[in-house]
Image: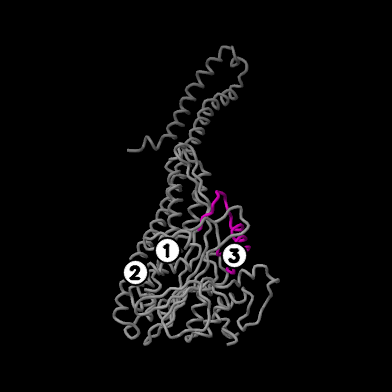
Amino acid sequence: MKHILTPREYEHFPNLHKFWTATGFCCNGRSMCSFRDWPGLLMLTAVARIHHVEFFQDGPRYRSNVQLGDPDTSTTQAFIIEQPDTATLRYFWDSYIIQKRSFLQCLDDFFHDQPSFNFTQVRPKILQMPSVLAKQTHLTFSYVLAREFDKSMRLDYSMIQKAAKDFGTWRDDRDFGPMNPVQRRELSGETTTFAPLALTRTSATAWFDSSEDRPWRLGIILLDRHPEFWGLPCQLQVPFAIVNGRYYGTPHTRSPADLLLECMKQNGTLNTSAIPGPLVVVEDLYRLVIHEWAHLAAFFTRDLNAIEWALQRGSGAYENDVNHLRNAMRDMFFSRRRMSHYCSLIKHCAESAAIHGRPIWCTTHNSTEAQRLTTRQTASDLQRDLCALEHTMTQIHLRLQSTMTHITAETTVMEAGRTRVQNKILLVLAIIGVIFLPVSSLAAVFSMGGSWAAGERNFGMFWVICGPVEVVLLGLLLAVSYWDIISSP
């Protein structure tokens, strides 16, 4: 085989073509640039990390970090591939893949590399219809990794994106962004500082070679490696994972492939089955995605709690100022802008669990009754967990909206208070004007000379005339000013 994509297929699978060109190769196998042309190319073409699971009647066999050799097509097996490279894809294409078109579509979805918001090309954002997705033999997860740094500082987009490129990622710069947490001021007056986070849009794809009348024999799970960031004054903390109620620490969480393989080893349903259905094989992949969403939701909840704590003056401040409210609104706009998109991604996962991953994975013609039973049970559990996660994210979205409404209302009340003070000042100025304007006007009328001059016989008469005029004008001013109060029932 000399190529995976022909030039005519470039338009049909643009993401796969983009990956090939970004990693220094074109789809017909000819090199497009050398290592010295691009310093990050060595990282982009790093050897993939591959784990292998074989399924027998007495249970699965797990192997870590396998080296690809002579293909074995006699057993039912699944490969977990972290950061697939061109050599690995060519090996599977030559040795295992029979359903070429469906595998190309799987790769194209996995290598989808378009920003969620600030995108330029419209075509990748056109909604795929559920009827089309249901006929596919692969399932793609799009989710967000939240990774915390070890120092408290403020990061911006340019810092995160440059650090990701310095590490050597092939994905678009806009797949990486910062999340600067809201700092919380305690009752003691001290400020609890939280370190910034890096948010990374990532993908995972599961493909099986099952058809309507033939059970699956090959499964391929593609994973993005965990991101790293070079050149920053801080480093990422070692991540953790809580999958299916079990805690996983440093030995397994540095690599997503290692973590997934370890979760599969701990999966009782998978290990007690003879040859499980595809959905049972990817159950732990679902749960890894659920953990990442729950992890992200916890950070958003912490930010919301800090904002609401400050709004209720838990920090001891008697009154919020406009700048504080403006910063809170910006922080919540950052969250609300993304939360609706995150909810749609979670909903997509829940809908896929409802149809057992993909309908073609488990039919009456390509699976046994035992496989269909475990598939239904697994799908029910996953759907229930995903619905609970979707409810949590929706509640966060509603809290964001209600808190933003409260900030808007509080700002309105603050402005109303300022307006009331200004009205009182204007009323005082009007009273002063009512007092002195008639005096100066009458003085001009009488010219204040001769017998009207100060100390003369008519000077007292001048004040007798001014007094009633001022009283009448002042009464009219007060009556007009408080007319709403007087006329109200």
Instruction: Report which residue position mark 1 lands on.
Output: 343
Q: Is residue 122 magenta?
A: no
Residue nearer the viewer, 276 or 430? 276
What's the residue at 43%, 60% (across, down)?
A: 248
Mark 3–mark 1 Cα distance, whole angstroms, equals: 23 Å
Nearest the viewer among 22 and 300 is: 22
Within the image, what quadrant is residue 174 found in?
A: bottom right
Nearer the observer: mark 2 or 3; the answer is: 2
In terms of image quadrants, where is residue 384?
A: bottom left
Instruction: Give the CA distance from mark 2 to mark 3.
Output: 40 Å
Residue 173 marker: 3
Question: Most extreme residue toward the right, as rendered?
Answer: 36
- Give the extent of the magenta segment: 147-175
Give the x, y percent position of residue 374. Answer: 31, 74
Q: Residue at x 61, y 57 (%)?
A: 159
**In terms of sequence position, does the residue under pointer 2 or pointer 3 come before the other?**
3
Q: Is residue 67 visible?
A: yes
81 and 365: which one is in front? Answer: 81
User: Contact, CB < 8 Å: mark 3 with mark 1?
Assistant: no
Circle number at residue 268: 2
Query: Pointers 2 and 1 in contact (CB under 8 A)?
Result: no
